[in-house]
């Protein structure tokens, strides 16, 4: 019998794990997820690396050796994270080859402190891409206004990008435009497109968390709680469908361009009164990616009920939900501004915690010398 996760995959959704650590790489748990849970990719972020390095002693030997050689904290974090991503890329190479580059992908993010610096983002993305040196790496770039030209430039240079921290359909459409412009530049320069892939990562649960809070604070219609995030993702997918039907995309497709697939991120349910599988089961349609923490993956495996495509027939319903939210006094533009700023700030905080943890570990390494 098929597992629930296989059913999700068969319905057109690529399952990626939202986690990575040296422990996973060395104890076989990642390989086990690949073999038994239909996992075909991995995403990382500063919070994931901070937790991985803080909660494991498997990094201490490398940290001590680099510290004794005089490496800076930035050099240490770059080597540790790129080493783990490179190893994961190698594990996923068979998947990458079997899917012709669509899956088997592992993401690594630029320093979140560069989220509002276009040129610095481009340069670090190029550096990370060169250090990992694997065809199946994706470089994560935030979808800030300053990130948009970086997405275009990196795509034009042949680097595959995972665009992160997307919260609105409007910003998503700008992200797609940046990706297409990058591809069009390559066509104009008679460069190939077939090796370039991209995903656009929508953060899901954080939208419900913020809007639910505002509904409660304003004593508004509480029947609208828990509806915004899925509706927002449905409208993003509607935009995706329109884009891939456009003459602009069809022209690029004739040059062997690959889709920039929508990716559903932040899929762990924060409000425990909600169905623990909702940000997976209600976001199933062809050409999607869903990146899940293992806890969410386990919930889907144990409790999920796959009903096929749960997106394509719900576009009108999603628009009605947003009209109701507006009538209830929810300023969605303000929600989006808050979530983007908060998302960048949280990743910056996690990055600084990671640097602090490494500084302490490096000091221990020097002392042990």
Image: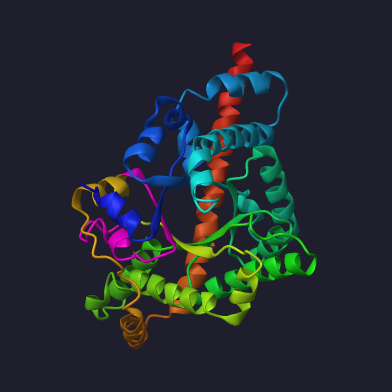
Q: Quadrant of residue 324?
A: bottom left
Q: Which residues are magenta?
A: 270-294
Q: Is residue 141 left or right of residue 34?
A: right
Identified at 66% across, 54% down, the residue is 114
Residue projecting furthest to the top = 369
- Give how far across and how far down residue 350 sits, in percent: 52, 45
Q: Nearer the viewer, residue 190 or 130?
A: 190
Q: Quadrant of residue 181?
A: bottom right
Identified at 64% across, 39% down, the residue is 132
Whether residue 271 is in magenta: the answer is yes
Whether residue 49 is in magenta: the answer is no
- Give how far across and how far down residue 188 sits, in percent: 78, 70
Identified at 67% across, 65% down, the residue is 146
Q: Is residue 358 left or right of residue 275?
A: right
Residue projecting furthest to the right = 189
Q: Main secondary structure of the magenta part?
A: loop
Q: Is residue 315 left or right of residue 110?
A: left
Establish if 242 lies above or below 130: below
Task: Kindly tell me whether residue 290 is visible in this rendering.
Answer: yes
């Amino acid at each position: 019998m098929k597992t629930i996760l296989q059913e999700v995959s068969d319905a057109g959704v690529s399952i990626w794990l939202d986690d990575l650590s040296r422990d996973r790489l060395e104890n076989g748990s990642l390989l086990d997820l690949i073999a038994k849970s239909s996992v075909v990719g991995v995403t990382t972020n500063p919070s994931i690396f901070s937790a991985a390095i803080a909660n494991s002693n498997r990094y201490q030997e490398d940290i001590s050796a680099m510290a004794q050689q005089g490496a800076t904290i930035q050099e240490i974090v770059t080597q540790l994270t790129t080493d783990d991503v490179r190893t994961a890329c190698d594990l996923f190479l068979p998947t990458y080859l079997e899917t012709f580059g669509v899956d088997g992908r592992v993401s690594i993010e630029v320093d979140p402190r560069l989220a509002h610096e276009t040129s610095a983002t481009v340069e670090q993305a190029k550096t990370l891409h060169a250090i990992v040196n694997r065809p199946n790496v994706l470089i994560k770039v935030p979808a800030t206004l300053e990130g948009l030209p970086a997405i275009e430039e990196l795509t034009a240079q042949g680097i595959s990008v995972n665009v992160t921290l997307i919260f609105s359909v409007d910003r998503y459409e700008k992200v797609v435009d940046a990706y297409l412009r990058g591809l069009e530049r390559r066509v104009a320069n008679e460069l190939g497109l077939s090796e370039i892939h991209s995903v656009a990562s929508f953060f899901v649960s954080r939208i419900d968390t913020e809007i639910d809070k505002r509904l409660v604070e304003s004593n508004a219609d509480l029947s609208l709680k828990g509806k915004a995030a899925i509706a927002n993702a449905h409208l993003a997918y509607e935009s995706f469908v329109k884009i891939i039907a456009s003459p602009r995309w069809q022209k690029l497709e004739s040059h062997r361009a690959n889709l920039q697939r929508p990716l559903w991120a932040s899929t762990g349910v924060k409000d425990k009164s909600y169905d623990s599988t909702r940000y997976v089961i209600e976001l199933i349609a062809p050409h999607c990616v869903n990146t899940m923490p293992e806890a969410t993956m386990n919930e889907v495996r144990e409790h999920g009920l796959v009903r096929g495509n749960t997106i394509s027939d719900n576009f009108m319903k999603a628009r009605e939900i947003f009209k109701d939210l507006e009538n209830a006094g929810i300023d969605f533009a303000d929600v989006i501004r808050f979530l983007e700023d908060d998302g960048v700030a949280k990743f910056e905080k996690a990055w600084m915690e990671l640097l602090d943890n490494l500084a302490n570990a490096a000091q221990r390494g020097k002392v042990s010398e």
